[in-house]
Image (cartoon, rainbow, N blue to C red):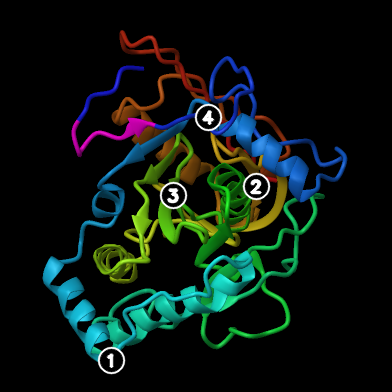
């Protein structure tokens, strides 16, 4: 893949693994439910292999992903924090990573407090969020894998400090280490868990702190790539200002779509255009990974559908030419109702959609 120089083009980063690979999608982290339990170290190696060849970097990453925030708002927050002497990151030098937890938490929550005092959190989806030191196993693991131990998490302040946290309530994660490659590999296991337990996630934002260098990098995960920001030195004032500006952009999200969520679905319901909103009664399959489709097979409430709705749905698809080949089976009527239309356009794309109403 050719990349162009310039601030608006994500550049391919150094690979986080030297393992040979064919394509980024050839080795992902999904597995069969009956497979052996995987530890944190095994998952880190798996994530290195999955993301190899799909890692990029951008010097304007947060600005592009979170564009709906005027620079004047960030400037007001920085000025306010400077006056209150909260614009600082001063851990004890040359110590272990745990010694950086509280100073970084103080900075992260200080930004939220400053925004709240400047009336900038009123309409934010993160208005009730708070960062905390976690550093213990989560309430659940993905599938049969071991429960992970994120260093710092943000969640509702009403839940902050409780004995255990679920991935379903985590909003942002922070990983702290003295080795950047290892830090990204481990942070990627957390991103994978967020995609698994929060179905509506379109992308995941991770925060990485290299405590030895006092450098922060952001990572944005999608089903196609991981893009990393350039390192920000928060040990000096210009770097602190740049970091605060990025966090203000993230905290300023006024709707869940901007924050990286698809509001048409969650773990209990799904909205299907032309058919309506359906309750999910069971899950038959869920392929868990970062890259790829992360396929789910869900069972919908059969009482909410009818043959007439299915036909209407098919007609909508045909009119938009989005589905030239369709196969529908409806077990709710105790017989198979095949309705097939062969390709009607010159496009080489064939798509099969099968709705199973059980």
Q: Which residue is mark 2?
A: 298
Q: Which residue is mark 3?
A: 219
For marks 4 and 2, give the one nearer the viewer. 2
Label 4: which secondary element: loop
Viewer-side residue, 127 vs 113: 113
Residue depicted at 49% across the width and 40% down the height = 310
Q: Are marks 2 and 1 in contact (CB under 8 Å)?
A: no
Image coordinates of residue 273 in percent, x first then y, are 40, 47
Q: Pick whichever of labels 1 and 4 is earlier in the sequence.
A: 1
Q: Residue at the far front: name it.
A: 94
- Which quarter of the figure has residue 151? bottom right
Q: Is residue 228 above or below residue 193?
A: above
Q: Tell me, yes or no, whether the highlighted magenta stretch contains residue 293.
A: no
Image coordinates of residue 265 in percent, x first then y, are 49, 56
Q: Is residue 278 visible?
A: no
Local packing at callout 1 (Cα closer than 10 Å; few below 14, some 14-19, many 20+) is: few
Residue depicted at 52% across the width and 58% down the height = 212
Distance in Å between CA atoms under marks 2 and 1: 51 Å
Rendered-image quadrant of the N terminus:
top left
Distance in Å between CA atoms under marks 3 and 4: 34 Å
Magenta segment range?
A: 6-12
Label 2: which secondary element: strand
Q: Is residue 167 left or right of residue 271?
A: right
Q: Is residue 77 above or below residue 199?
A: below
């Amino acid at each position: 893949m050719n990349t162009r120089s310039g601030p608006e083009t994500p550049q391919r980063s150094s690979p986080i693994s030297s393992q040979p690979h064919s394509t980024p999608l050839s080795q992902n982290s999904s597995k069969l439910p009956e497979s052996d339990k995987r530890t944190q170290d095994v998952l880190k190696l798996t994530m290195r292999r999955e993301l190899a060849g799909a890692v990029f970097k951008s010097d304007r990453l947060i600005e592009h992903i979170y564009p709906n925030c005027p620079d004047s708002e960030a400037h007001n927050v920085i000025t306010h924090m400077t006056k209150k002497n909260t614009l600082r990151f001063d851990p004890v030098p040359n110590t272990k990573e745990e010694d950086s937890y509280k100073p970084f938490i103080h900075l992260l929550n200080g930004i939220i407090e400053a925004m709240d005092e400047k009336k900038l959190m009123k309409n934010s989806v993160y208005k009730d969020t708070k960062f905390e030191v976690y550093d213990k196993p989560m309430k659940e693991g993905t599938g049969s894998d071991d429960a992970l131990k994120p260093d710092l998490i943000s969640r509702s302040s009403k839940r902050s400090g409780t004995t255990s946290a679920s991935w379903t309530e985590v909003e942002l994660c922070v990983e702290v280490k003295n080795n950047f490659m290892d830090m990204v590999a481990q942070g990627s296991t957390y991103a994978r868990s967020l995609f698994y337990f929060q179905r509506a996630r379109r992308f995941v934002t991770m925060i990485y702190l290299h405590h030895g260098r006092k450098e922060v990098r952001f990572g944005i995960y999608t089903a196609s790539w991981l893009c990393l920001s350039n390192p920000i030195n928060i040990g000096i004032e210009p770097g602190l200002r740049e970091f605060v500006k990025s966090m203000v952009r993230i905290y300023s999200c006024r709707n869940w779509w901007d924050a990286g969520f698809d509001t048409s679905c969650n773990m209990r319901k799904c909205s299907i255009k032309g058919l309506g909103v359906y309750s999910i009664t069971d899950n038959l399959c869920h392929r868990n990974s970062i890259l790829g489709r992360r396929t789910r097979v869900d069972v919908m409430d059969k009482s909410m559908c009818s043959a007439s709705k299915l036909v209407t749905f098919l007609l909508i698809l045909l009119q938009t030419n989005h589905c030239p080949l369709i196969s529908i089976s409806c077990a709710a009527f105790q017989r198979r109702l095949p309705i097939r239309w062969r390709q009607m356009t010159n496009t080489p794309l064939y798509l099969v959609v099968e709705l199973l109403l059980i």
